[in-house]
Amino acid sequence: MRREEYQAFFKEGVQTLKTEGRYRVFAALERQTGKHPRALWHRPDGNVREVISWCSNDYLGMSQHRAVLDAAKSTLDAEGAGAGGTRNIAGCNHFHVELEAELADLHGKEAALLMTSGYVANEAALGAVGGMLPNAIMLSDELNHASMIAGVRASRAEKQIFRHNDIAHLEELLQAIDPARPKIIAFESVYSMDGDIAPIAEICDLADKYGALTYLDEVHAVGMYGPRGGGVAERDEVMDRVDLIEGTLAKAFGVVGGYVAGTDAAIDFIRSNASSFIFTTAPAPALAAAALTAVRHLKQSGQERAAQQRQAALLKEKVAAANLPQLPSVSHIVPIHVGDAATCKQASDMLLEDFGIYVQPINYPTVPRGTERLRFTPGPMHDDRMIEELVTALQHVWTTLNLPRELN
Ligand SMILES: *Cc1c(COP(=O)(O)O)cnc(C)c1O
């Protein structure tokens, strides 16, 4: 191709997204310590305005927690900005080791392995395990996150998709597979776009029956569920039945990084074989120290979890009373159905421009077409008044844009 043709190709690709209303526009925020969920929005025209964020994954505000900031600052001053290498070559910091021990304990596992992000953890762990078990087959929930799909792909193992949270379908698939073949069931606990929760115990029952390994993504649950924030598996008392638990340090723990926890043997195997763990610079010591502080804090404090659940329940109640079409979430996630990409963007724009309410539209391919939605993540810092004002604003937007009141 000629050089201009490449550029024309790129422009056309983006134009398609714009025509469909799926073009992603990032809102540039200036976060302010101590003010979450309030933040300053830097508009494209250069003006700055205060908004309330309703879609942050800083679920419990831990990114602004005093102890977390102190840990980051003191480590930054004491040890510098970067880790200085990969874990293997000069980059293994004592905070990485401490953090891994803390995470293993959080999930009741023998060991844990810290990664650059939750995405990388899924890609690395599923890729290594599925890729190296001979003739393995991966059974993946149809709504699994992009990072698990990347892990399944990276493994190059055969894959089968089971219908979302559908135990009968999963069993049907398992039954048809040669019992001698290694099988990995990959699924999530809280599905963050719908707010529903997997039947973890039933999936473990099937894994026992058919000799499969279980791999659970608890990214939207760690810090928030279970008496110590060990996730839904801790809450449901099934942690010991799940072989590998993956989590993030970037959502409820408020920092950045991901991990996988399991037996000594499994974690040592992943440590020794996962390319995207081995060949990348280790997380900054200050960030590891900050994450360690957040994990420790949420292990012994249930206050943030309780407040999050309270505010989520309150928002759901108000949304129901306002006759807005919310999806039946059983978690802290509150999704409201719109059903069309362009309208979803329009609703989001109106909330931001007219009400200072920031909620990103959720469109294809994050969710299937026709299920476009606004997705709210209330937390302990969203007070009752903010919830009241949000619902009033939503009423206005739904009426003005004549949005659907029913789920279809
Ligand atoms: C956000 C997310 C990840 C990735 O975690 P990061 O730490 O942000 O890379 C993995 N799995 C699920 C289900 C997620 O929502």
Image (cartoon, rainbow, N blue to C red):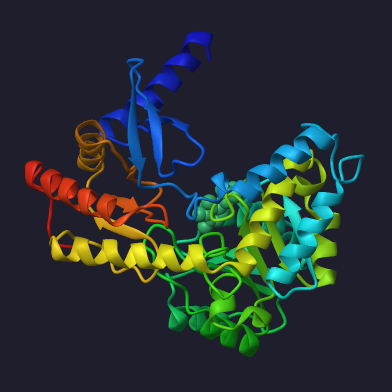
Q: Is residue 181 above or below residue 218?
A: below
Residue 317, position as x, y percentages in the image: 23, 67
**Which image quarter holds the C terminus?**
bottom left
- Determine which quarter of the picture holds residue 329: bottom left
Above or below 151: residue 359: above
Residue 101: horizontal and vertical position, in percent? Answer: 79, 64
Is 200 left or right of 371, judged from the image as shown?
A: right
Residue 114 position within the rendered picture, expressed as x and y whole percent measured from the top left = 74, 54
Residue occupying the point 77% across, 67% down: 133
Can I make out residue 16 in this image? yes
Q: Is residue 391 above or below residue 142?
A: above
The residue that appears at 25% across and 56% down in the rendered structure is 336
In the image, residue 72 sits, relative to residue 94, either above or below, namely above
Q: Nearer the viewer, residue 112 or 170?
A: 112
Question: For this view, does 59 lie left or right of residue 24?
Answer: right
Q: Residue at x 61, y 71 (%)?
A: 228
